[in-house]
Amino acid sequence: MKKKLVVAAAAGAMCVAATTAFALENEFHGMYKAMGYSSNFFNGYTGLSPATMLRKDAGVSNYFEQRARLMYIAKANDNLKLVTHFELDTRFGGETGATYYTNDSGRLDADQITLETKNIYLDTNCPITGANVKIGLQPWADAYQSLFLLADMTGLHVTKKFDPLTASFGWFRYNDQGTTSDLAGNDSDDLFILDAKYALNKDMTVGASFYAIDQGTTATPGNSTIQDLYMPGVNASLTFGPATINPFVAVQLGRTTGNQNLGGFLAGATAKVKSVGPGNVNAAFVYMSGDEAGTTTQGKAFKNIGKNQTYFNASNMWLLVRSGQAINSSTSVLGNDMTVGGRGLVGMFAGYEGTVNKAFYNANVGYAMTAEQRKNGTTEESSSLGTELNATVGYKLYDNLAVSLTGAYAILGDALKKSAAANGKGISGFATTVADADNPWLANLQFSYTF
Protein backbone atom coordinates (compact mmCIF):
# COMPACT_ATOMS: atom_id res chain seq x y z
CA MET A 1 0.00 0.00 0.00
CA LYS A 2 2.79 2.40 0.89
CA LYS A 3 4.44 2.35 -2.56
CA LYS A 4 1.18 2.90 -4.44
CA LEU A 5 0.07 5.82 -2.30
CA VAL A 6 3.48 7.48 -2.33
CA VAL A 7 3.38 7.32 -6.15
CA ALA A 8 -0.01 9.05 -6.03
CA ALA A 9 1.48 11.72 -3.79
CA ALA A 10 4.35 12.23 -6.24
CA ALA A 11 1.86 12.79 -9.04
CA GLY A 12 0.24 15.57 -7.04
CA ALA A 13 3.64 17.22 -6.59
CA MET A 14 3.91 17.68 -10.37
CA CYS A 15 1.50 20.61 -10.06
CA VAL A 16 4.10 22.48 -7.99
CA ALA A 17 6.66 22.33 -10.79
CA ALA A 18 4.15 23.65 -13.31
CA THR A 19 3.50 26.93 -11.47
CA THR A 20 5.15 30.15 -12.66
CA ALA A 21 6.38 32.82 -10.22
CA PHE A 22 6.01 36.61 -10.62
CA ALA A 23 6.86 39.73 -8.57
CA LEU A 24 7.36 38.97 -4.89
CA GLU A 25 5.30 40.35 -2.00
CA ASN A 26 6.51 40.01 1.58
CA GLU A 27 4.07 39.27 4.42
CA PHE A 28 4.88 39.10 8.13
CA HIS A 29 2.52 37.70 10.76
CA GLY A 30 2.92 36.27 14.21
CA MET A 31 2.06 36.32 17.88
CA TYR A 32 3.58 36.88 21.31
CA LYS A 33 2.32 35.49 24.59
CA ALA A 34 3.65 36.01 28.09
CA MET A 35 2.11 33.91 30.86
CA GLY A 36 2.60 34.09 34.60
CA TYR A 37 1.70 31.04 36.70
CA SER A 38 1.10 30.42 40.37
CA SER A 39 0.21 26.75 40.82
CA ASN A 40 0.66 23.64 42.93
CA PHE A 41 0.65 21.57 39.71
CA PHE A 42 2.29 23.49 36.87
CA ASN A 43 5.98 24.06 37.51
CA GLY A 44 7.49 24.91 34.12
CA TYR A 45 8.72 21.37 33.42
CA THR A 46 6.21 19.71 31.09
CA GLY A 47 8.20 16.49 30.78
CA LEU A 48 7.28 15.30 34.28
CA SER A 49 4.64 12.58 34.70
CA PRO A 50 1.32 13.23 36.49
CA ALA A 51 2.42 10.77 39.19
CA THR A 52 5.29 13.16 39.96
CA MET A 53 3.30 16.39 39.72
CA LEU A 54 0.23 15.20 41.70
CA ARG A 55 1.35 14.82 45.30
CA LYS A 56 0.50 15.41 48.92
CA ASP A 57 1.54 18.76 50.44
CA ALA A 58 2.48 20.05 47.01
CA GLY A 59 4.44 23.28 47.03
CA VAL A 60 3.61 26.33 44.94
CA SER A 61 5.53 27.27 41.80
CA ASN A 62 5.62 30.89 40.65
CA TYR A 63 7.08 31.64 37.22
CA PHE A 64 6.71 33.45 33.90
CA GLU A 65 7.21 32.05 30.42
CA GLN A 66 6.85 33.43 26.92
CA ARG A 67 6.43 32.31 23.33
CA ALA A 68 6.81 34.21 20.08
CA ARG A 69 5.85 32.88 16.65
CA LEU A 70 7.09 34.58 13.51
CA MET A 71 5.61 33.84 10.10
CA TYR A 72 7.16 35.07 6.86
CA ILE A 73 5.30 34.49 3.59
CA ALA A 74 7.01 35.05 0.24
CA LYS A 75 4.04 35.64 -2.06
CA ALA A 76 4.63 35.54 -5.81
CA ASN A 77 0.92 35.97 -6.62
CA ASP A 78 -2.47 34.83 -5.37
CA ASN A 79 -1.69 31.29 -6.56
CA LEU A 80 1.85 30.80 -5.30
CA LYS A 81 3.56 31.45 -1.97
CA LEU A 82 6.23 30.04 0.31
CA VAL A 83 5.17 29.88 3.96
CA THR A 84 7.72 29.80 6.77
CA HIS A 85 6.90 29.71 10.48
CA PHE A 86 9.28 29.83 13.45
CA GLU A 87 8.93 29.68 17.23
CA LEU A 88 10.93 31.00 20.19
CA ASP A 89 10.23 29.76 23.75
CA THR A 90 11.68 31.10 27.00
CA ARG A 91 11.09 30.72 30.71
CA PHE A 92 12.01 33.77 32.76
CA GLY A 93 15.27 32.91 34.50
CA GLY A 94 15.98 30.03 32.13
CA GLU A 95 15.53 26.27 32.29
CA THR A 96 17.79 23.48 31.06
CA GLY A 97 15.28 20.65 30.70
CA ALA A 98 13.54 19.21 27.64
CA THR A 99 10.88 21.94 27.56
CA TYR A 100 13.32 24.43 26.02
CA TYR A 101 15.73 21.94 24.42
CA THR A 102 18.60 23.00 26.77
CA ASN A 103 18.96 26.39 25.05
CA ASP A 104 16.67 28.61 27.12
CA SER A 105 17.60 32.27 26.57
CA GLY A 106 15.96 33.40 29.81
CA ARG A 107 19.22 33.29 31.76
CA LEU A 108 21.66 36.12 32.38
CA ASP A 109 22.72 37.94 29.21
CA ALA A 110 20.27 35.86 27.12
CA ASP A 111 22.61 34.61 24.36
CA GLN A 112 21.25 31.23 23.28
CA ILE A 113 19.95 29.64 20.09
CA THR A 114 16.21 29.17 20.67
CA LEU A 115 14.75 29.47 17.16
CA GLU A 116 12.60 26.42 16.30
CA THR A 117 11.22 25.54 12.88
CA LYS A 118 7.47 24.91 12.76
CA ASN A 119 6.62 25.11 9.07
CA ILE A 120 8.32 25.50 5.70
CA TYR A 121 6.07 24.64 2.77
CA LEU A 122 5.05 25.72 -0.71
CA ASP A 123 1.38 26.63 -1.09
CA THR A 124 0.14 26.80 -4.68
CA ASN A 125 -3.03 26.56 -6.72
CA CYS A 126 -2.23 24.13 -9.50
CA PRO A 127 -2.72 25.69 -12.98
CA ILE A 128 -3.35 22.22 -14.45
CA THR A 129 -6.07 20.89 -12.12
CA GLY A 130 -7.14 23.93 -10.08
CA ALA A 131 -6.35 22.02 -6.88
CA ASN A 132 -4.59 23.63 -3.93
CA VAL A 133 -1.28 21.88 -3.26
CA LYS A 134 0.85 22.21 -0.15
CA ILE A 135 4.22 20.42 -0.07
CA GLY A 136 6.76 20.52 2.73
CA LEU A 137 6.69 20.82 6.53
CA GLN A 138 3.12 21.89 7.28
CA PRO A 139 0.39 21.74 9.95
CA TRP A 140 -2.42 19.19 9.75
CA ALA A 141 -5.39 18.48 12.02
CA ASP A 142 -7.86 15.61 11.88
CA ALA A 143 -11.61 16.11 11.45
CA TYR A 144 -12.34 14.86 14.99
CA GLN A 145 -11.48 17.84 17.19
CA SER A 146 -7.78 16.82 17.05
CA LEU A 147 -8.38 13.82 19.33
CA PHE A 148 -6.41 11.63 16.89
CA LEU A 149 -3.72 14.03 15.64
CA LEU A 150 -2.79 17.68 15.31
CA ALA A 151 0.84 18.17 14.32
CA ASP A 152 3.40 19.72 12.01
CA MET A 153 4.61 17.07 9.54
CA THR A 154 6.49 16.73 6.28
CA GLY A 155 4.40 15.66 3.32
CA LEU A 156 1.96 16.62 0.61
CA HIS A 157 -1.64 17.83 0.97
CA VAL A 158 -3.93 18.35 -2.04
CA THR A 159 -7.40 19.94 -1.81
CA LYS A 160 -9.89 20.31 -4.66
CA LYS A 161 -13.32 21.95 -4.61
CA PHE A 162 -16.18 20.53 -6.66
CA ASP A 163 -18.92 22.72 -5.25
CA PRO A 164 -20.67 21.74 -3.04
CA LEU A 165 -18.06 18.98 -2.43
CA THR A 166 -14.53 19.61 -1.13
CA ALA A 167 -12.12 16.66 -1.25
CA SER A 168 -8.54 16.33 -0.05
CA PHE A 169 -5.74 13.79 -0.14
CA GLY A 170 -2.62 13.81 1.98
CA TRP A 171 0.55 11.84 2.55
CA PHE A 172 2.77 12.60 5.55
CA ARG A 173 5.98 10.88 6.64
CA TYR A 174 6.38 11.64 10.33
CA ASN A 175 9.26 9.27 11.07
CA ASP A 176 12.04 7.57 9.09
CA GLN A 177 14.62 5.39 10.82
CA GLY A 178 16.57 4.56 7.66
CA THR A 179 20.36 4.41 8.13
CA THR A 180 23.38 4.42 5.81
CA SER A 181 23.12 0.62 5.61
CA ASP A 182 19.41 0.71 4.74
CA LEU A 183 17.14 2.31 2.14
CA ALA A 184 15.32 5.53 2.98
CA GLY A 185 11.61 4.81 3.35
CA ASN A 186 11.99 1.14 4.31
CA ASP A 187 11.71 1.93 8.02
CA SER A 188 9.33 4.86 7.85
CA ASP A 189 6.01 5.75 9.44
CA ASP A 190 3.53 7.12 6.90
CA LEU A 191 0.08 8.64 7.32
CA PHE A 192 -2.36 8.72 4.38
CA ILE A 193 -5.56 10.75 4.54
CA LEU A 194 -8.72 11.08 2.47
CA ASP A 195 -11.19 13.75 3.57
CA ALA A 196 -14.43 14.97 2.03
CA LYS A 197 -16.92 17.67 3.02
CA TYR A 198 -20.32 18.14 1.37
CA ALA A 199 -22.35 21.30 1.97
CA LEU A 200 -26.03 20.36 2.00
CA ASN A 201 -26.89 24.04 2.40
CA LYS A 202 -25.44 27.11 4.12
CA ASP A 203 -26.28 25.67 7.56
CA MET A 204 -25.42 21.99 7.17
CA THR A 205 -22.20 20.28 6.11
CA VAL A 206 -21.49 16.56 6.38
CA GLY A 207 -18.07 14.96 6.12
CA ALA A 208 -16.38 11.60 5.81
CA SER A 209 -12.75 10.59 6.10
CA PHE A 210 -10.40 7.65 5.91
CA TYR A 211 -6.98 7.70 7.59
CA ALA A 212 -4.37 4.96 7.26
CA ILE A 213 -1.04 4.45 9.02
CA ASP A 214 1.67 2.20 7.62
CA GLN A 215 4.11 2.10 10.50
CA GLY A 216 7.48 0.59 9.71
CA THR A 217 9.20 1.39 13.01
CA THR A 218 8.59 0.99 16.72
CA ALA A 219 10.67 4.04 17.58
CA THR A 220 9.45 7.45 18.65
CA PRO A 221 7.98 9.71 17.45
CA GLY A 222 4.83 7.70 16.97
CA ASN A 223 2.79 5.07 18.80
CA SER A 224 5.04 2.04 19.20
CA THR A 225 2.02 -0.29 19.60
CA ILE A 226 0.62 0.36 16.09
CA GLN A 227 1.60 -1.82 13.14
CA ASP A 228 -1.15 -0.92 10.67
CA LEU A 229 -4.15 1.29 11.39
CA TYR A 230 -7.24 2.12 9.32
CA MET A 231 -9.63 4.78 10.61
CA PRO A 232 -12.89 5.56 8.77
CA GLY A 233 -15.18 8.18 10.25
CA VAL A 234 -17.98 10.66 9.69
CA ASN A 235 -18.58 14.16 11.02
CA ALA A 236 -20.92 17.10 10.51
CA SER A 237 -21.51 20.76 11.25
CA LEU A 238 -25.21 21.49 11.77
CA THR A 239 -26.71 24.91 12.50
CA PHE A 240 -30.24 25.29 13.84
CA GLY A 241 -30.99 28.95 14.46
CA PRO A 242 -28.59 30.14 17.19
CA ALA A 243 -27.24 26.63 17.86
CA THR A 244 -24.36 24.90 16.03
CA ILE A 245 -23.62 21.22 16.73
CA ASN A 246 -20.57 19.33 15.47
CA PRO A 247 -20.99 15.55 15.99
CA PHE A 248 -18.34 12.99 15.01
CA VAL A 249 -17.82 9.20 15.04
CA ALA A 250 -14.77 7.15 14.02
CA VAL A 251 -13.65 3.53 14.31
CA GLN A 252 -10.19 1.98 14.14
CA LEU A 253 -9.17 -1.31 12.52
CA GLY A 254 -5.79 -2.89 11.91
CA ARG A 255 -3.08 -4.61 13.95
CA THR A 256 -0.85 -3.86 16.89
CA THR A 257 2.85 -4.73 16.96
CA GLY A 258 1.82 -7.64 19.21
CA ASN A 259 -0.42 -8.91 16.37
CA GLN A 260 -3.64 -7.94 18.16
CA ASN A 261 -6.65 -6.82 16.18
CA LEU A 262 -7.58 -3.17 16.63
CA GLY A 263 -11.15 -2.22 17.43
CA GLY A 264 -11.04 1.34 18.75
CA PHE A 265 -14.04 3.66 18.79
CA LEU A 266 -14.37 7.45 19.11
CA ALA A 267 -17.56 9.50 19.38
CA GLY A 268 -18.43 12.96 20.54
CA ALA A 269 -19.87 16.35 19.79
CA THR A 270 -19.26 20.03 20.40
CA ALA A 271 -22.00 22.66 20.55
CA LYS A 272 -22.40 26.42 20.78
CA VAL A 273 -25.65 28.28 21.39
CA LYS A 274 -25.35 31.99 20.66
CA SER A 275 -27.18 34.87 22.29
CA VAL A 276 -28.19 33.15 25.51
CA GLY A 277 -28.58 36.27 27.59
CA PRO A 278 -25.56 38.50 26.96
CA GLY A 279 -23.28 35.62 25.92
CA ASN A 280 -22.96 32.14 24.46
CA VAL A 281 -23.25 28.63 25.90
CA ASN A 282 -20.62 26.03 24.98
CA ALA A 283 -20.80 22.27 25.50
CA ALA A 284 -18.69 19.26 24.52
CA PHE A 285 -18.75 15.51 24.99
CA VAL A 286 -16.25 12.79 24.12
CA TYR A 287 -16.20 9.01 24.41
CA MET A 288 -12.97 7.19 23.66
CA SER A 289 -13.00 3.39 23.95
CA GLY A 290 -10.58 1.54 26.22
CA ASP A 291 -9.36 -1.90 27.24
CA GLU A 292 -10.22 -3.46 30.59
CA ALA A 293 -6.81 -5.13 30.68
CA GLY A 294 -3.45 -3.99 29.37
CA THR A 295 -3.07 -7.00 27.07
CA THR A 296 -5.97 -8.60 25.17
CA THR A 297 -6.47 -10.42 21.89
CA GLN A 298 -8.75 -7.58 20.73
CA GLY A 299 -7.24 -4.12 21.10
CA LYS A 300 -10.44 -2.18 21.87
CA ALA A 301 -8.66 0.97 23.02
CA PHE A 302 -8.74 4.00 20.72
CA LYS A 303 -5.19 4.91 19.71
CA ASN A 304 -3.53 8.16 18.70
CA ILE A 305 -0.10 8.70 17.19
CA GLY A 306 1.30 10.59 20.17
CA LYS A 307 -0.22 11.97 23.36
CA ASN A 308 1.44 15.38 22.93
CA GLN A 309 -0.03 15.70 19.45
CA THR A 310 -3.67 15.39 20.57
CA TYR A 311 -6.01 18.12 21.81
CA PHE A 312 -9.62 18.77 22.77
CA ASN A 313 -9.76 22.57 22.90
CA ALA A 314 -13.58 22.54 22.91
CA SER A 315 -13.43 21.30 26.51
CA ASN A 316 -12.16 24.75 27.62
CA MET A 317 -10.26 23.11 30.46
CA TRP A 318 -6.88 23.97 32.00
CA LEU A 319 -6.20 20.98 34.27
CA LEU A 320 -8.30 17.94 33.23
CA VAL A 321 -7.43 18.61 29.58
CA ARG A 322 -4.64 20.93 28.49
CA SER A 323 -5.75 24.39 27.49
CA GLY A 324 -5.69 25.50 23.87
CA GLN A 325 -4.29 28.80 25.17
CA ALA A 326 -1.28 27.19 26.86
CA ILE A 327 2.19 27.73 25.47
CA ASN A 328 5.23 26.04 27.06
CA SER A 329 3.35 24.66 30.08
CA SER A 330 1.09 22.61 27.83
CA THR A 331 0.10 19.62 29.94
CA SER A 332 -2.72 18.24 32.11
CA VAL A 333 -3.34 15.97 35.08
CA LEU A 334 -3.32 13.13 32.54
CA GLY A 335 0.04 14.17 31.11
CA ASN A 336 -1.88 14.85 27.85
CA ASP A 337 -2.68 11.13 27.54
CA MET A 338 -6.41 11.30 26.92
CA THR A 339 -6.48 7.54 26.36
CA VAL A 340 -5.48 7.22 30.06
CA GLY A 341 -3.00 4.47 29.29
CA GLY A 342 -5.50 2.66 27.03
CA ARG A 343 -8.38 2.74 29.53
CA GLY A 344 -10.33 5.19 27.38
CA LEU A 345 -12.05 8.43 28.33
CA VAL A 346 -15.53 9.79 28.96
CA GLY A 347 -15.64 13.57 29.25
CA MET A 348 -18.45 16.11 29.64
CA PHE A 349 -17.82 19.85 29.52
CA ALA A 350 -19.91 23.02 29.54
CA GLY A 351 -19.32 26.73 29.82
CA TYR A 352 -20.53 30.27 29.27
CA GLU A 353 -18.69 33.14 27.53
CA GLY A 354 -19.40 36.75 26.70
CA THR A 355 -18.08 40.25 26.06
CA VAL A 356 -18.89 43.68 27.44
CA ASN A 357 -17.36 46.37 25.25
CA LYS A 358 -13.61 45.62 25.43
CA ALA A 359 -13.94 43.23 28.37
CA PHE A 360 -14.43 39.47 27.95
CA TYR A 361 -15.16 36.61 30.32
CA ASN A 362 -15.88 32.89 30.48
CA ALA A 363 -16.59 30.21 33.08
CA ASN A 364 -16.42 26.45 32.53
CA VAL A 365 -16.99 23.13 34.28
CA GLY A 366 -15.92 19.65 33.22
CA TYR A 367 -15.96 16.07 34.43
CA ALA A 368 -13.88 13.13 33.19
CA MET A 369 -13.71 9.40 33.93
CA THR A 370 -12.13 6.35 32.35
CA ALA A 371 -14.21 4.28 29.94
CA GLU A 372 -12.88 1.02 31.42
CA GLN A 373 -11.46 -0.04 34.78
CA ARG A 374 -8.55 -2.37 35.47
CA LYS A 375 -7.36 -4.35 38.45
CA ASN A 376 -4.59 -3.05 40.67
CA GLY A 377 -3.67 -6.24 42.48
CA THR A 378 -6.89 -7.39 44.09
CA THR A 379 -8.53 -3.94 43.93
CA GLU A 380 -10.42 -2.46 41.01
CA GLU A 381 -9.11 0.96 40.01
CA SER A 382 -11.45 3.91 40.39
CA SER A 383 -12.89 5.31 37.17
CA SER A 384 -13.37 8.90 38.37
CA LEU A 385 -10.63 11.27 37.16
CA GLY A 386 -12.09 14.47 38.51
CA THR A 387 -14.09 17.67 38.09
CA GLU A 388 -12.69 21.04 37.06
CA LEU A 389 -14.03 24.57 37.48
CA ASN A 390 -12.33 27.54 35.84
CA ALA A 391 -13.04 31.17 35.00
CA THR A 392 -11.34 33.91 33.00
CA VAL A 393 -11.77 37.69 32.86
CA GLY A 394 -9.89 39.84 30.38
CA TYR A 395 -9.65 43.18 28.64
CA LYS A 396 -8.58 44.20 25.12
CA LEU A 397 -6.08 47.02 25.61
CA TYR A 398 -5.76 47.38 21.84
CA ASP A 399 -7.29 45.54 18.90
CA ASN A 400 -4.30 43.16 18.85
CA LEU A 401 -3.35 43.12 22.55
CA ALA A 402 -5.35 41.51 25.36
CA VAL A 403 -4.62 40.85 29.03
CA SER A 404 -6.49 38.21 31.04
CA LEU A 405 -6.55 36.50 34.42
CA THR A 406 -7.62 32.85 34.82
CA GLY A 407 -8.26 30.71 37.86
CA ALA A 408 -8.76 26.92 37.72
CA TYR A 409 -9.37 24.28 40.39
CA ALA A 410 -9.74 20.51 39.95
CA ILE A 411 -11.39 18.19 42.46
CA LEU A 412 -9.55 14.94 41.83
CA GLY A 413 -11.46 11.69 41.56
CA ASP A 414 -10.10 8.63 43.34
CA ALA A 415 -8.39 7.44 40.13
CA LEU A 416 -5.90 10.32 40.48
CA LYS A 417 -6.22 11.25 44.14
CA LYS A 418 -5.74 7.86 45.76
CA SER A 419 -2.49 5.91 45.85
CA ALA A 420 -1.55 3.71 42.92
CA ALA A 421 0.53 1.45 45.15
CA ALA A 422 -0.38 -2.24 45.25
CA ASN A 423 -4.12 -2.75 45.79
CA GLY A 424 -4.76 1.01 45.65
CA LYS A 425 -7.65 2.76 43.90
CA GLY A 426 -5.32 5.08 41.94
CA ILE A 427 -4.25 4.46 38.34
CA SER A 428 -0.66 3.34 37.93
CA GLY A 429 1.49 5.81 36.03
CA PHE A 430 -0.93 8.67 36.71
CA ALA A 431 -1.64 8.74 40.46
CA THR A 432 0.90 9.09 43.25
CA THR A 433 2.22 5.94 44.92
CA VAL A 434 2.31 7.55 48.39
CA ALA A 435 -0.24 9.63 50.32
CA ASP A 436 -3.40 11.06 48.76
CA ALA A 437 -2.64 13.90 46.32
CA ASP A 438 -3.74 17.52 46.82
CA ASN A 439 -6.32 18.93 44.44
CA PRO A 440 -4.46 20.91 41.73
CA TRP A 441 -5.09 24.59 41.11
CA LEU A 442 -3.62 27.46 39.11
CA ALA A 443 -3.76 31.20 38.65
CA ASN A 444 -2.69 32.43 35.22
CA LEU A 445 -1.92 35.97 34.03
CA GLN A 446 -1.71 36.26 30.25
CA PHE A 447 -0.61 38.95 27.80
CA SER A 448 -1.46 38.09 24.19
CA TYR A 449 -0.42 40.09 21.09
CA THR A 450 -1.11 39.06 17.49
CA PHE A 451 -0.04 40.73 14.26
Image (tube, grey):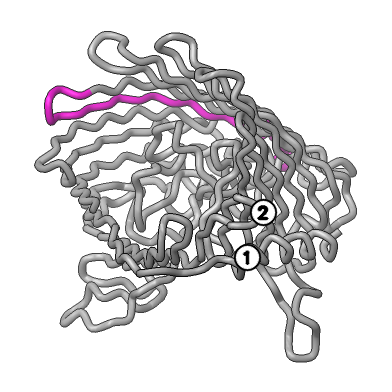
The disc placed on residue 353 is none
Q: Nearer the viewer, mark 2 or mark 1?
A: 2
User: Which sits in the foreground, 54 or 435?
Assistant: 54
Q: Residue furthest left?
A: 397
Quadrant hosting residue 274: top left
Start and end of the magenta stretch?
Answer: 355-381
The answer to whether residue 366 is above or below residue 50 is above
The answer to whether residue 60 is visible is: yes
Q: Is residue 360 magenta?
A: yes
If the image is split into quadrants, where does the N terminus sit?
bottom right
Q: In the drawing, does residue 301 fall left or right of residue 297? A: left
> Is residue 372 at least partly visible in the picture?
no
Residue identifier under label 2: 170
Q: Residue at x 70, y 69 (%)?
A: 219
Q: Earlier in the sequence, mark 2 or mark 1?
A: 2
- What whole-number distance in Å separates the C-alpha atoms at marks 2 and 1? 19 Å
Where disc 2 sits, the SS reads strand
Percent coordinates x, y for residue 301 in the rendering: 74, 40
Q: Within 10 Å of the Cα at label 1, are there few (<14), some (14-19), or many (20+) other Cα atoms?
A: few
Residue type marked 1: Pro
Quadrant for residue 23, please give it: bottom left
Circle 1 SS class: loop
